[in-house]
Amino acid sequence: MDSSSKAPIQVGPIQVRFLVDAEDSGGSVTVFECRIPAEARVSVPHSHDAFEETIYGLDGVTEWTVDGEAREVGPGESLCIKRGSVHGFENRDAADASFLAIATPGVFGPAYFSEIAEVITAAAGGPPDLGAIREVMSRHGLSPARPVGPPPPAP
């Protein structure tokens, strides 16, 4: 499928557009572009055990935290996130940012972002159902770094 025919997926404040999906690559890689508005925190810190993720900055600057270490990724800079590394990102800048994400092997795809978008849309502007977010993450091989949802009751 031609990458120009792949529709963007709006996930809360970010926009994701797949350029190469698992079908295109025979499962070897998925590549998607993320556009993040200014001053947006968008990613629940998480890890994944089934793939590496390489980030390549296109525009603006995103701040990544990987295994507790902060790193900025700007245009032309890259960051490899190894399997099992806890990571998240945000755009603290006053300008929009974008990056490419390359997942190898290509076991992660558009369905994850579409399902998360559905949970956010169902919240109708209120807080999303954190249990549903956790379930979608788990089904697609992402593990939240900390429990997603209310804290457990005190003993």
Image: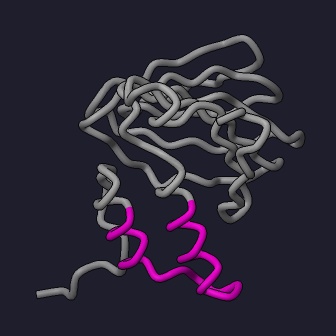
Q: Quadrant of the N terminus?
A: top right
Q: Is residue 130 above or below residue 142?
A: below
What residue is shown at x 30% (from left), y 49% (from top)? 141
The figure's colour scheme reads: one colour
Q: Is residue 104 above or below residue 153?
A: above
Residue 154 place in picture, x, y as percent: 18, 86
What residue is shown at x 68% (from left), y 65% (from top)? 12
Foreground: 38 or 111?
111
- Horizontal side of residue 97 vs 88, given as left or right: right
Is residue 124 a member of the stretch shown in magenta? Answer: yes
Is residue 132 a member of the stretch shown in magenta? Answer: yes
Q: Quadrant of the C terminus?
A: bottom left
Q: Which residues are magenta?
A: 114-136
Count how many numbered circles sit on residues in the image: 0
Q: State whether the magenta stretch is mostly helix, strand or loop.
A: helix
Foreground: 5 or 88?
5
Residue 81 place in picture, x, y as percent: 41, 25
What residue is shown at x 61% (from left), y 54% (from top)? 42
Foreground: 32 or 6?
6
* Furthest residue toward left: 155
What residue is shown at x 35% (from left), y 27% (from top)? 105
* Furthest residue toward front: 1
Residue 61 place in picture, x, y as percent: 75, 29
Quadrant location of residue 78? top right
* Furthest residue toward right: 95
- Horizontal side of residue 62 vs 130, given as left or right: right
- Horizontal side of residue 39 vs 23, given as left or right: right
Q: Is residue 51 above or below residue 34?
A: above
